[in-house]
Amino acid sequence: MAGIQGFVLAGGKSSRMGQDKALMQINGQPMILRAVGVLRPFVDEVSLLAPPGRYEHLGLPVVPDKWAEGPLAGICAGLFYTHARWNIFLACDLPLVSKTFVQLLNERMRLTQCDAVVPRTADGWQPLSAAYQATCQTAFTQALQQGERSIIRLLGDIRVEEITSDQMHRAGVHEAELANVNTPDDWARVTGISNDQR
């Protein structure tokens, strides 16, 4: 396996937002396509992890969950699908995430001997804006089949290289970039501080 695969997680129901948040626009662009654009300079291909039929109109490969709904199932589907050693995952609802963050993730990923590179902010682990080797698929799938739904609990079963808040800050990345939006209040707060420079 060689190269790097990019995946955008877009399988959620957006029930708290009241509309499909992946298609909500930030600076004139749907969040899902913004995430694709952030990934593209660093990967060989970008695919969407989403239910069949939801985003085919965007003209990108769509990989459906094979097991159940939820972020862990989406990551498992991506790792099952990939032909790359390393795989970068971004949630679709990170309207402030920057190419600078993905560049930092990419740099750490290329140097590590670990199975995954995962940022950790003041809010805790951020496993939906992280990189995983394809070999994680076995442990993740077994856990999913046993009823596990939390990817954070699985980080103890693999070798993880942590990106700290201080390391992000030194690279020019603010941890607010990894804050997702789930509600209209989240959206109002984030769009109030968004700008076209990201």
Image: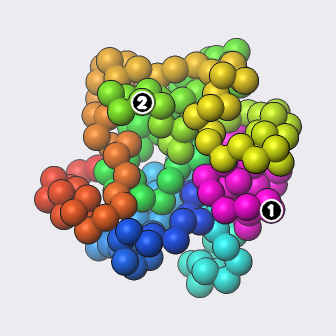
Per the image, is 76 magenta?
yes
In the image, the segment drawn in magenta is 63-87
> Percent position (x, y) of residue 110?
63, 24
Residue in view at x 79 percent, y 60 percent: 67
Q: Is residue 161 left or right of residue 66?
A: left
Q: Is residue 2 left or right of residue 169?
A: right
> Percent position (x, y) of residue 8?
57, 57
Question: Can the viewer see residue 132?
Answer: yes
Mark 1 and mark 2: span between their CA atoms? Answer: 28 Å
Residue that carries the numbered disc 2 in the rendered image: 124
For mark 1, does the 10 Å Cα neighbourhood hold few (<14), some (14 to 19), or many (20 or more) residues?
few
- Compared to residue 174, the image places residue 10 above or below, namely below
Q: Of the residues shown, which amino acid type is indicated by label 2? A: Gly
Residue in view at x 52 percent, y 20 percent: 162
Residue in view at x 44 percent, y 72 percent: 15
Residue that carries the numbered disc 1 in the rendered image: 66
Q: Identify the colour scheme used.
A: rainbow
Q: Of the residues shown, which amino acid type is indicated by label 1? A: Lys
Q: Is residue 61 left or right of residue 188?
A: right
Residue in view at x 54 percent, y 29 percent: 118
